[in-house]
Amino acid sequence: MTPEFIFFAALSAYQRGDHRKAGQYAKQALNGHLPDGALTVRVIHLYLTSTELLWMLAPSDEIGALVTRAEQAAECAGDPAACAIAHNLRGQYLVANNDLHSGLLAFAEAARLAEGSMNLLAEIQAFSDLGHNMIGSDLSRGVAILHQAHAFVAGQDLSDIPVTDRAMARVLQARLAGFIGVAAFDSGRFDEAESWLRRSASQLHTANALGHFALISNFLGQLLMTIGRFEDAEAVLHKALRLLLADFDLGTYQGYNLGLLGKLYLEWGKLDSAESAIKAGWDRLQRTQNKAIMPIVRNYLGELYAAPSYPHHDLSKATALFNETITECRRTGFQRSEIAAQALLALANLRAADTAGALAASAAAVERLAQTGTMPSLRTEEIYFARYQVMHAIGSYEEAAMWLDRAKDVLLAKAVTIESLEARQKFLYRVQTSRSILTAV
């Protein structure tokens, strides 16, 4: 069979929702005689998309070589759409294996090339990835890009693209809806966020796009945890974990979702369950070394050690973990984890009677937040409240009151986006941070 025939067999498998078979066929095509050109780019793209859960396990030199091969093939083809797809693959590789800044540059170039290429797949993916990753650097700009992408896609007729590409276009469209939900969550619009995220997760589950489903489920779980719906968050995360158990138990997403499940149990006050889930997630991420996810779960592990009621409570371990995250994120550009670690370090230092360290870390947290603006999956009110706690502890009551007011204002602005009174009450009185702010007020 020719590589072209095998590629169409791979597309057919993807269309049936059999992403594993699609990846196997695509790899078979890559091992055949594929001259540099647009077809080679499409085969590599299909292979990396179908097997994302596997290569995100640890973006190896082999994956880097495939991305380079796609770039070389696209250059030979001279096709803007092929070049856009290749640059997008480079961005994904860089974010997972290197740093956010270099990934954003690659995504921006992909979007520039995709725009006007008349290739719907290239355009949806480029602008979705650019907008979603931009949120980690500039929330308002990322939100604007995502909504522009959605308006563009909404105006397209999928029947205008080849039948073989429609399944992937639907997956990318569903993924974009999820990214918009993430942006709404990051902006503190909770009901809107849940609507987008549930729609996306349902569509991705139907399409058997397990990698994307696991990612969107993670964000949905974060949202439900953040607003105090702990039982709903637990159900969402357990479903995602079960679906990946057979084939991808050691993957990055599995590690992330386990870590998040542990964070949920921390918030819920179930420390035994928190310990087993966080440590299992951390163990998986030690193997994958994903630069975006590791600092998030490292912070969860630090929170566990810092918890006063944890049987293995160890402030020195907690502060070491927070400092490691801060150092790493200054290099990789994942600012939200750095800011979170600074606030957590401040509270750990305060408990350790290191007043100078607490003052320095809490000041760094609020200063970085002022520079970056609202950050994804970061509770702004929590950062302000940490500063309040430190200032109150040293007797600077006037400044402490200012930070408490800021925390309260952010908290109440988020609360009004929850229409249901019962759900709003859970956010305000079941979530420890919310309850602590209101109690202090």
Image (cartoon, rainbow, N blue to C red):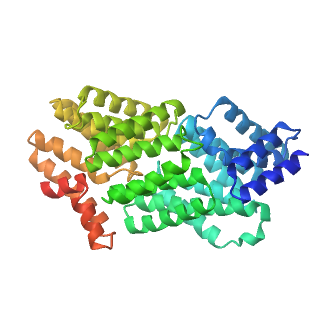
Q: Position of residue 267 (x, y in %)?
A: 28, 49
Name the side, left or right, on which 274 lies relative to 246: left
> In the depicted view, which residue is nearer to us: 306 or 148?
306
Residue 375 visible (yes or no): yes
**Image point 16% across, 32% down: which residue?**
355
> In the depicted view, which residue is nearer to us: 364 or 321?
321
Name the side, left or right, on which 411 lies relative to 95: left
Q: Relative to 187, is 50 above or below? A: above
Q: Position of residue 11 (x, y in %)?
A: 77, 55
What is the quadrant of residue 281 in the picture?
Answer: top left
Name the side, left or right, on which 299 lies relative to 206: left
User: Quadrant where the N terminus lies?
Assistant: top right
Residue farthest right in this picture: 1
Q: Position of residue 269 (x, y in %)?
A: 25, 47
Residue 115 visible (yes or no): no
**Image point 17% across, 58% down: which residue?**
438
Name the side, left or right, on which 283 lies relative to 157: left
Q: Position of residue 320 (x, y in %)?
A: 32, 27
